[in-house]
Image (cartoon, rainbow, N blue to C red):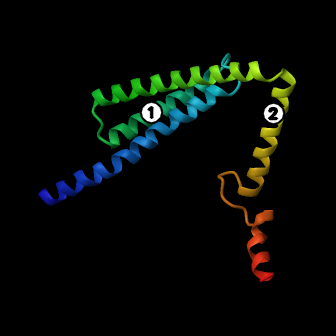
Amino acid sequence: MNVSNAKKMSIRQLFAPALLAIAIAPLALTAQAYSHGDREGRGADFERMEERMEEHRQAVYDRADISEEKQAELNAAHAEHREAMRALREEHRERVADILSDEEQEALRNAMREAHEEYRGKHGKRGRYNENSDHANTDSESTDSD
């Protein structure tokens, strides 16, 4: 039974960082969601999403056997990180506004959106390489000419 407990501890220790990363992922997505669009009128859907993310995070903490004290520390660290990222995004927006005119900002947003759509067209929604893209034939073409 000691060997089994030793295995459990090593497996738990091995997977704890991965589980923690899974727990943090919803927070990163929340931070990204905060950076898009209007924060007014987030409504019940946003509150439900936050509740689901909190439940998911708590389940991961429980699965990783994270103590309540460490959970509180992690939650405080996440909140601090979210606030710092929010402040940094706002500072960046102000700096861009100082550099570019409204028209230039709009042109940059449009160019970025187009580049993103082109990338997704070649690599798919999850960033995987699409065999039907223009780059798929470059390897075979280069070998044919040799």
Q: Which residue is mark 2?
A: 108
Instruction: Let me know if residue 1 appears in the view.
Output: no
Is any part of residue 79 visible from this angle?
Answer: yes
Nearer to us of marks 1 and 2 is 2
Image position, residue 42 (x, y; %): 65, 21
Question: Which residue is under mark 1?
Answer: 55
The residue drawn where x is 12% and y is 57% is 2
Which quarter shows the N terminus? bottom left
Label 1 vs 2, first from the N-terminus: 1
Task: Give the left or right position of residue 67, taking residue 95 as reference.
Answer: left
- Residue 135 appears at what percent x and percent y? 77, 64
Looking at the image, is 3 positioned above or below residue 107?
below
Q: Position of residue 114 (x, y in %)?
A: 82, 43
Furthest residue toward left: 2
Q: CA distance from mark 1 to mark 2?
A: 38 Å
Residue 139 is left or right of residue 80, and the answer is right
Q: In percent of the image, x 45 and y 43: which residue is there?
A: 22
Q: Nearer the viewer, residue 43 or 77?
A: 77
Disc 1 is placed on an element classified as: helix
Amino acid at the residue labelled 2: Leu
Q: Give me the residue at 22% from left, 57% from top.
A: 7
Name the quadrant containing residue 72. top left
For this rendering, which residue is in front, 88 or 42? 88
Quadrant in the picture for the C terminus: bottom right
| Badge 1 amino acid | Glu
> Residue 91 at what x, y percent from top left?
63, 20
Dot 2 crowding, Cα within 10 Å, few <14, some 14–19, many 20+: few
Extreme residue toward the right, this view:
103
Q: Nearer the viewer, residue 63 or 72?
A: 72
Helix, strand or loop at disc 2?
helix
Within the image, what quadrant is residue 49 found in?
Answer: top right
- Identify the residue at image location x=72%, y=62%: 130
